[in-house]
């Protein structure tokens, strides 16, 4: 029993996958949680030891559909929303409000699937039923990814994006006008930066993600193993094949890699797993169902979809991310997670309301209201520096709820991020070495143990 799975399927596709997995249409799932409270656009439930809040991100005026694909560490969300004429627009949400729409190249229909803190994005465009290619957005400009040389292919796949704007994906190549195989690669500004090749002896590779250190994960064939595909990590020109779970199936894939080098993906034909320090571990599931793994954050939290319900794996536990209460179809999809633990995707709503983009926040069950923390940044050194010098700042945290730690934080420097955690309220010094000239905006985001977040003031660093 095996279906080939793809990480960006919508609810309709997942319903089809579940039918594929067991030969029948998916049954409605019984509710697994009790509602605690609700507002006009959010509902909070208790699921086991966790408090799960689902928030409706809303739609464009007159629209009937929206879906979220990714969330960055500043809390900005990218996805799709239909307009009053029924056309799906690529949009960005900020604080639950659509603040931007994205251009598309030519007449192609595009979807943006990954977003970093510089509002650079990657996704794909489809011109017709046979021509599709990867797209990179930077400063409002959409760029088609360059094909690999020596081929007439229409373009390359854009799958992953890091804080510096490097894109991981793959494309056909190596066969003149008739592509002989597919290679994973890294692109910068839409141009091929490096063809990373294949696992030694193999003839196929595809990259799905790249972290801020430039490590790439994906899947590919290896020498002497035929069509069997292995998950891998590529680091500075070297492939490391990740071990499989025991089983008869012939495919493992690395879908996402965090800054620590932890990888989340699928093994043994579709079992959700994580690889840490080269060791594979299966993620718990309520039942053997068709599954998709989408992303892992720097804390090791993993999101995906099990059957027809979004899922978060946190602290070794499987937490279902249910749709809106009384949904017409009991189905949801989880696609993106940031370092503060906010998850985005799509979910069915009650009859007549269709599918909406949503955000889930998950925190341990606790007593009493939660006051959000506060975070400020201050320069601890010159804000005008030369290339190769380090900028120094001080991050200061305050939280009236003193017991709500630890407080993980992310500092976005404009060329990457720094992550860490504060055990108590107070200050911490953070530095960043800049390797290129420019003017960069620095901002921090902190979250407490119950899911409340705070965004700091901004600093400007000028590098000459």
Image: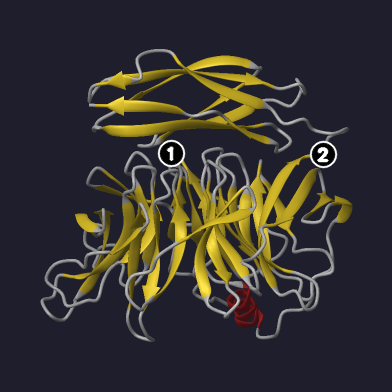
- Is the C-beta separation of discs 1 and 2 under 8 Å? no
Where does the N terminus fall, quadrant-wise? bottom right
Asked if one can make out residue 196 in the rendered structure from this viewpoint, the answer is: no
Quote the CA–CA distance across marks 1 and 2: 28 Å
Please tell me which residue lies in front, 233 or 87: 87
In the picture of the structure, the residue carrying the numbered disc 2 is 365
Which residue is painted at 79% across and 76% down in the image? 328
Residue 9, relative to residue 96: is it above or below? below
Classify residue 415 by image quadrant: top left
Q: Relative to residue 374, is residue 415 drawn left or right?
A: left
Which residue is painted at 84% across and 34% down in the image? 369
Residue 204, relative to residue 107: is it above or below? above
Classify residue 147 by image quadrant: bottom left
Residue 460 % position (x, y):
40, 27
Asked if one can make out residue 316 in the rendered structure from this viewpoint, the answer is: yes
What scheme was used to colour the molecule? secondary structure
Which residue is painted at 34% across and 64% down in the image? 135
Please tell me which residue lies in front, 409 or 225: 409
Which residue is painted at 34% across and 85% down in the image? 130
Are there few (<14), some (14-19), or many (20+) residues within 10 Å of tag 1? many
Are there few (<14), some (14-19), or many (20+) residues within 10 Å of tag 2? some
Residue 281, relative to residue 252: is it above or below? above
Q: Relative to residue 236, is residue 270 drawn left or right?
A: right
Mark 1 or 2 closer to N-term? 1
Find numbered disc 2 in the image and state the secondary structure of the residue it sits on: loop
Residue 62 % position (x, y):
65, 73
Residue 456, relative to residue 113: is it above or below? above
Find numbered disc 1 in the image and state the secondary structure of the residue it sits on: loop
Residue 11 % position (x, y):
63, 73
Which mark, residue 208? none
In the picture of the structure, the residue carrying the numbered disc 1 is 259
């Amino acid at each position: 029993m095996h279906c080939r799975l793809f990480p960006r399927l919508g609810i309709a596709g997942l319903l089809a996958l579940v039918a594929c997995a067991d030969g029948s249409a998916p049954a409605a799932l019984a509710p697994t949680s009790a509602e605690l409270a609700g507002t006009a656009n959010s509902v909070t439930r208790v699921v086991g030891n966790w408090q799960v809040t689902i928030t409706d991100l809303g739609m464009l005026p007159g629209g009937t559909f929206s879906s979220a694909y990714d969330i960055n560490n500043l809390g900005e969300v990218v996805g799709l929303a239909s307009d009053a004429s029924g056309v799906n627009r690529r949009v960005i949400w900020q604080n639950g409000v659509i603040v931007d729409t994205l251009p598309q190249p030519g007449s192609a229909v595009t979807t943006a699937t990954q977003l970093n803190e510089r509002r650079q994005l990657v996704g794909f465009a489809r011109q017709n039923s046979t021509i599709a290619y990867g797209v990179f957005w930077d400063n409002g400009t959409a760029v088609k990814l360059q094909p690999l040389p020596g081929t007439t292919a229409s373009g390359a796949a854009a799958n992953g994006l890091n804080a510096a704007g490097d894109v991981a994906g793959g494309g056909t190549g190596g066969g003149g006008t008739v592509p002989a195989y597919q290679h994973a690669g890294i692109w910068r500004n839409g141009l091929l930066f490096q063809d990373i090749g294949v696992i030694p002896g193999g003839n196929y590779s595809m990259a799905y993600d790249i972290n801020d250190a430039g490590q790439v994960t994906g899947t590919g064939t290896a020498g002497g193993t035929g069509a069997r595909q292995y998950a891998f990590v590529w680091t500075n020109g070297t492939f490391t094949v990740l071990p499989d779970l025991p089983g008869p199936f012939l495919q493992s894939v690395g879908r996402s890699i965090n800054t620590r080098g932890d990888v989340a993906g699928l093994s043994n034909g579709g079992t959700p797993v994580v690889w840490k320090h080269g060791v594979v571990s299966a993620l718990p599931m309520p039942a053997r169902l068709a599954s998709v793994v989408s992303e892992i954050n720097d804390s090791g939290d993993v999101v995906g979809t099990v059957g027809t319900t979004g899922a978060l794996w946190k602290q070794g536990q499987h937490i279902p991310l249910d749709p809106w209460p009384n949904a017409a179809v009991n189905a949801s999809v989880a696609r993106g997670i940031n370092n503060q633990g906010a998850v985005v995707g799509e979910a069915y709503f009650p009859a007549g309301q269709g599918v909406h983009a949503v955000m889930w926040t998950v925190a341990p069950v606790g007593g009493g209201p939660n006051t959000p923390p506060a975070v400020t940044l201050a320069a601890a050194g010159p804000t005008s520096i030369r290339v190769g010098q380090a900028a120094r700042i001080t991050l200061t945290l305050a939280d009236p709820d003193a017991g709500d730690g630890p407080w993980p934080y992310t500092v976005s420097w404009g060329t990457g991020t720094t992550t860490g955690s504060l055990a108590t309220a107070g200050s911490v010094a953070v530095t960043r070495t800049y390797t290129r000239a420019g003017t960069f905006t620095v901002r921090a985001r902190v979250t407490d143990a119950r899911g409340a977040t705070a965004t700091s003031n901004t600093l400007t660093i000028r590098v000459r």
